[in-house]
Image (cartoon, grey):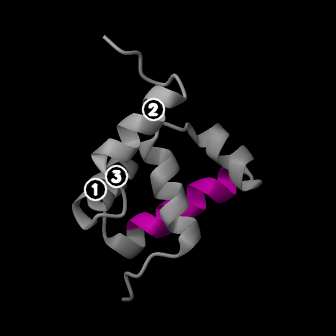
Amino acid sequence: MNKALTSGEREMIRLIAEGYKDQELARRFRISLRTLKGKQWSLMRKLNLPDVSSIIDYALAKGVITVYEVLESRFSKGRIEAP
């Protein structure tokens, strides 16, 4: 099975890692929540992963996203407060 990620899959992974909730993701991609869940399931199946949090682990391990990018985005969007 081809594990090359599409640009849309990479974007979804990045947004999940940044802390976007499912409804926010669905609005951003202009799709229904049901379609979003299907896309997430397909991505997990493609990568042979058990859940959405594993997608983030995979992306960090493969360099799709970096911890720095995730934290920078979460701080800038107010999703994490500085100590």
x 42%, y 45%: residue: 17
Q: Is residue 43 above or below residue 65?
A: below
7 vs 70, left or right, is: right
Magenta stretch encompasses residue 73? no
Q: Identify the disc placed on residue 60.
A: 1
The quadrant of the rendering that contains the C terminus is top left
Query: Tag 2, which secondary structure?
Result: helix
For mark 3, what is the residue? 56
Instruction: Identify the magenta region.
Output: 33-44
User: What residue do we see at 67% from left, 53% from top?
Assistant: 34
**Kind of residue at disc 1:** Leu
* Side of 57 relative to 75 (left or right): left
**C-alpha separation, residue under disc 1 versus residue under disc 3:** 6 Å
Give the residue type that dot 3 points to: Ile
Question: x and y percent of residue 29 in the render?
Answer: 70, 55
Mark linked to residue 74: 2
State which tag comes first along the sequence, 1 or 2.
Answer: 1
Q: Main secondary structure of the magenta part?
A: helix
Position in image of residue 10 (x %, y %):
48, 64
Q: Residue at x 50, y 29 (%)?
A: 76
Q: Position of residue 54 (x, y in %)?
A: 30, 53
Q: How much space separates mark 3 and mark 2, taking CA atoms? A: 14 Å
- Mark 1–mark 3 CB contact (< 8 Å): yes
The x and y percentages for residue 23 are 65, 39
